[in-house]
Amino acid sequence: MSATDTTLKQRHRAMWASGDYPTIAHIVAPVSEHLVRACGVREGQRVLDVAAGTGSSAIPAAKTGAQVIASDLTPEFFDVGRAAAAEAGAELEWMQADAEALPFDATSFDVVLSAIGAMFAPHHDAVARELLRVTKPGGTIAMANWTPEGVIGQTFKLLGQYAPPPPPGAQPPPLWGSEDHVRELLGDGCSELRLERHTLDVTAFPTPRDAVGTFREKYGPTIAILNHIGDDADRLAEFDRRYLELAERTNLAGEGEPARYEYEYLLVVGTRA
């Protein structure tokens, strides 16, 4: 790995470790649970969760009796994950790993999955190659990824306008929520590829302003944007105004009701050729 790549990985790890990611992971946990069900994970299978975070997918997968490894670039998440696994009565292994260079032998796993995780690695081709490489022929590759058109996809489009230039070859995370992009990345390596759009109903925030506040204070990518803006008061005010406008525009609740959002995601389930 080049010095540039090493620095990029360190920055990504620090970004995700900032804030309070477990709070965000709890909000979107139903997506992870849906992914595990869609994979049909069962007892005795060898399962790898890529970019596992605090284990929102790995823990329910382990509860089926599967042999699960939860891997992530950011091991700062693992203590929270281990506590959650112990509370759930689930046994699994935790391992630091880069989604673009997984430290596992080829054809090692029956199921390789990633819920709102591997999509954030910057080099999509490398991630796709690794997901395919470590999955057994006939095994399952599955992902859940925010779509470009959904609320989170729109949010990342906004964030990108205030972020520093991406590194060479990096692609926007929500591209993984585009059917054409997924087919291009995984289609040749899969004998079957099922792509379905779903929505997560989110009612965790009393108001749109609370939604913005939560992501502003607890979500690593937003914190990184705020750090990049720094002391530029005018740009910060503009960012906050546009972020709140987006949160208000996408709020589906009626007047006087708690905020309600539908976060659209693409469910990907493939059979390794």
Image: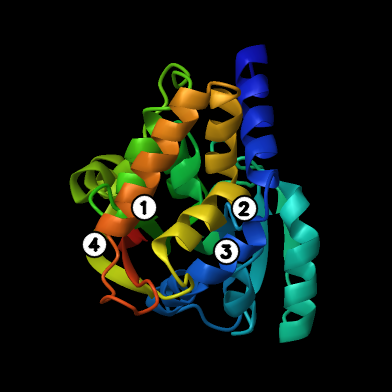
Residue 50 placement (x, y as % from top left): 56, 53
How far apart marks 1 and 3 lie (CA) works out to 14 Å
Earlier-in-chain disc, 2 versus 3: 3
Quick one: label 2, few (<14), some, or many (20+) residues within 10 Å?
Answer: some
Residue 189 is at least partly visible in this image: no
Q: Pointer 4: what residue?
A: 195
User: Which residue, given by chain and number where applicable, does mark 2 sit on?
Assistant: 218
> Viewer-proximal residue, 18 or 43?
18
Residue visible at 23% across and 65% down?
197
Q: Residues within 10 Å of mark 1 (few under 14, many from 20)?
A: some
Q: Report the amino acid beneath label 1.
A: Ile
Q: Residues within 10 Å of mark 3 (few under 14, many from 20)?
A: some
Q: Of the numbered discs in the image, which one, if any, rests on residue 39?
A: none
23 above or below 129?
below
Q: Position of residue 245 (x, y in %)?
A: 31, 49
Q: Is residue 81 left or right of residue 50?
A: right
Please name whichever residue, 218 or 97, is drawn nearer the observer in this view of the structure: 218
Viewer-nearest of discs 2 and 3: 2
Label 3 sits on a secondary structure element that is helix
CA gap between label 3 and label 4 equals 23 Å
Front position among marks 1 and 2? 2
Q: Quadrant of residue 241?
A: top left
Identify the residue at image location x=67%, y=22%. 6
Residue assigned mark 3:
25
In terms of sequence position, does the residue under pointer 1 or pointer 2 come before the other?
1
Identify the image quadrant of the N terminus.
top right
Give the number of the mark in front: 3 or 4: 3
Q: Which residue is mark 1?
A: 152
Q: 130 above or below 255?
A: above
On the rendered image, what quadrant is the C terminus found in?
bottom left
**Of callouts 1 and 3, the N-terminal one:** 3
Give the amino acid at mark 2: Lys
